Amino acid sequence: MTSFDFSIAEKDLNTSCIGRKINHKVVTVTTMNDAEDGARQGDPHGTVYIADVMTDGRGTKGRNWVATSNENLYMSIILHMQLLQDEDPSVSRRKEFDIDVAGALASLQALEEIGLKEVKIKWLNDLWVKGHKILGALTEYKGKITVDSRDVHLYVLGIGLNVNCDMRRDPVMHRISTSVMCELGRSVSREVIFAKICNHLEPLLKMDRQELLKLYKLHEAFQCGDKVKVYKQDNSVVNCTFREVNDDWSVELIEDGHCTPVCFPCTEISLRQIRAKVVYVLNGQDFHSWSSECLLKTCNSLLDIQTYEVKSISAEKVNFDTMTSCAMVIIGQLTSVPKSTPNYMTIIEDYVKKGGSCLAIGNACSLFQSEDGNEIKGQHPTQVQEEIPSIIETIVCSVPSSEQRKQHVHLCLFQDNCQLFPTHYTTSNILAYRDLNTKDDIRESDGTHICDQCIDNSTDVVVLDVGKGKLCLCRPNIEICYADLHEYFPRLEDKSGKLKDTVHHRDLLFQDILTKLL
């Protein structure tokens, strides 16, 4: 990633003040301090301090802000503000919150402008996409300063936006964060996003609180009636019902077991939605641990975690009670296919037939076979011997209508799995297949696995109606991505480029599977 280029940003700027002066550093402690120092030395209203990396970035409530990727946007903006006569910034922080919301709204509008939809404002100053944080804003009041012989109130607005880093493959942050690149599937210009944020921010800063609140409520993540967990400063956690955000930016909640609403400022609490639906990933001695672990990472990064909680569950603990809260169950690569139907499969079969959803991956597809289009029966291949998967290229059927060409995805496939794909269901929706008509299509030079069984049955991913429920059979091991090879399959690391090149289309295919099942 190249350093920030103001000449590119300047072409898209249409502001009078915001972003017209930029001070850029490759590395700094925090741009918040840089901006304050610059303001006291005479930098004008709207001056922006940008850094490629911050060594000690800060977020709300004194938290650290991880800002070590030079592919993101870290900036702080100097703001000279006039306050109403009855506003005392030493007593009330409402103006800080006004600026927080303006910054979040400006960023949301900029992201929508480049094609990123489903962005929500999480009370009060974060942006979420499907429950994953993509941006944080922070405003700090720095007191009065004299500018051109008049006193103004100095505020500094900090914005941190994940732009081109692959947060879905981050070993820690994948559970809670995303980026513009992850959502759009392509790298985007930091300079263009910067200019768009500035363009939207300038008019928003001129709006009064009621106008900002009206816009905020069009995009807020929590809706009236949502069940939320409230995390207090004393580390206690209580369950509440969300009511609304008030015109002083406090939030109105009703604690469980009570009737009277209570208001909290954003400085005192944090909110998280209570998720009533669970996606279970099976684990235990019958399953490869790498498959279960990769599935947990993939589901946590791609599912809407505002709605769904992803849990690992031992096959021995699967029972009819656990399935009552289950939105979907996922079965990954088996260490060996059992010779008789295990107890957990009896329960899962019943769950699917009664309206549940199941995703079977790799050789787990062998657990499902239909004789007449209605019954699910297990088949029993021999012990799985293969240790290293091959790389295949499959075609995604459900490409967006705007795409005129087929989307090819590279995935991992164990050769022994080729024979384990049933075809006798009455209804099916094919999501991915291989374009193999004859053996002449086999190209030895590209290192892509193709065999006679693949040619005979080229379907790779299919969704089936089973009773009242849905079953997805995914022959390739879609849970494995390029970032997993070093840990689980180091002998395949030289092939990581193939998986990385199409990782976004792999994500889209997995999300399409989830959409069909959920």
Image (cartoon, helix red, strand yellow):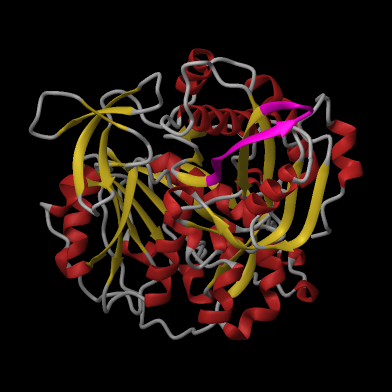
Q: Residue at x 47, y 65 (%)?
A: 172
Residue 283 in picture, x, y percent from top left = 29, 70
Tell me the quarter of the image containing the C terminus.
top left
Query: From this viewpoint, which residue is outermost toward the front?
Result: 149
For the residue pair 316 and 486, the one nearer the viewer reads as 486
Q: Residue at x 74, y 50 (%)?
A: 50
For the residue pair 468 and 152, the one nearer the viewer reads as 152
Residue 450 in picture, x, y percent from top left = 65, 69
For the residue pair 92 and 23, the one nearer the viewer reads as 92
Answer whether residue 53 is visible to the viewer in this image.
yes
Helix, strand or loop: magenta stretch: strand
Question: Looking at the picture, does residue 477 appear above or below residue 229?
Answer: below
Give the magenta part as a residue range: 134-151
Place residue 260 in its image quadrant.
Answer: top left
Answer whether residue 424 is visible to the viewer in this image.
no
Q: Is residue 409 magenta?
A: no
